[in-house]
Image (cartoon, rainbow, N blue to C red):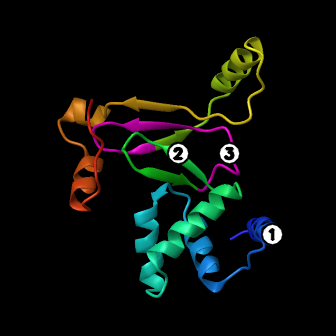
């Protein structure tokens, strides 16, 4: 975990009159140990594998603090669950392609989208602060081959899949 993250969190906690705790430290480490999106329940499971003494409430409160400190972003991937994105600090303007068949999420950046957003916001008299785009698409593997390894893996792990519209 980067020292910069710890410094930003420490400054935020001091400003709120809160202290850094060992439990928050473990949750922070779990959040930024992987460069993947996750739900609060997935994080709870990850944290509890290493420390069963951390309560679900502590995980949820810490997530709220990390979002408020702007170290973590809540994103809507359309699956009726709040998903957290730990890597937007390095890539503040990134987008998500979401497969409506298997739930696979692919992050992408595109300078053309950034330029278009800048043009649109300026034309309408705004200044963009942050930008996120979610594109929902169908899985090409499923369409072409009739099966998708991501769909099979999602079902085997019991992941909730997106509801088709």
Q: Bin the neighbour count of mark 1 within 10 Å (Cα to Cα): few under 14, some 14-19, many 20 and up.
A: few
Q: Is residue 90 magenta?
A: yes
Q: In the rendering, which numbered label is found on residue 7?
A: 1
Determine the CA span between mark 1 and mark 3.
Answer: 19 Å
**Numbered badge on residue 91:** 3
Q: Disc 3 vs disc 2: which is toward the camera? A: 2
Give the secondary structure at mark 2. strand
Label 2 belongs to which residue? 75
Give the quadrant of the C terminus: top left
Q: Can residue 24 be seen by looking at this rendering?
A: yes
- Closer to us: 63 or 43: 63
Which segment is the magenta one? Answer: 86-105
Per the image, label 1 sits on a secondary structure element best described as helix
Q: Position of residue 39 (x, y in %)?
A: 44, 58
Q: Quadrant of residue 164?
A: top left
Against 27, residue 147 (above or below) is above
Instruction: Please tell me the numbered disc located at residue 61.
Output: none
Q: Is residue 81 left or right of residue 92?
A: left
* Residue for point 48% across, 73% down: 57
At 47% from the left and 84% from the top, the residue drawn is 50
Residue 124 point in image, percent of width and height: 73, 13
- Secondary structure mainly formed by the magenta segment: loop
Of residues 17 and 44, which is closer to you in this image?
17
- Whether the residues at callouts 1 and 3 have beta carbons within 8 Å, the answer is no
18 within the magenta span: no
Asked if the residues shown at circle 3 and circle 2 are in contact, with their CB atoms under 8 angstroms apart, the answer is: no
User: Disc 1 vs disc 3: which is toward the camera?
Assistant: 1
Dot 1 or dot 2: first in sequence order is 1
Label 3 and label 2: CA atoms lie apart by 14 Å
Could you say where residue 88 lies in the image, as x and y percent from the top left? 65, 49
Location of residue 61 by image quarter: bottom right
Under circle 3, the secondary element is loop
């Amino acid at each position: 975990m980067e020292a910069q993250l710890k410094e930003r969190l420490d400054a935020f906690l001091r400003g709120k009159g809160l202290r850094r705790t060992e439990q928050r430290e473990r949750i922070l480490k779990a959040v930024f140990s992987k460069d993947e999106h996750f739900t609060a329940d997935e994080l709870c499971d990850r944290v509890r594998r290493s420390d069963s003494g951390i309560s679900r409430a502590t995980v949820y409160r810490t997530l709220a603090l990390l979002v408020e400190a702007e170290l973590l972003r809540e994103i809507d991937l359309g699956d009726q669950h709040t998903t957290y994105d730990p890597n937007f600090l390095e890539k503040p303007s990134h987008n998500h392609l979401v497969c409506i068949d298997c739930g696979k999420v692919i992050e992408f950046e595109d300078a053309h989208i950034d330029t278009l957003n800048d043009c649109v916001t300026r034309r309408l008299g705004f200044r963009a602060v942050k930008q996120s785009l979610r594109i929902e698409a169908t899985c090409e593997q499923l369409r072409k081959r009739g099966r998708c390894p991501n769909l099979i893996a999602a079902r085997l792990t019991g992941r909730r899949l997106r509801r088709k519209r």
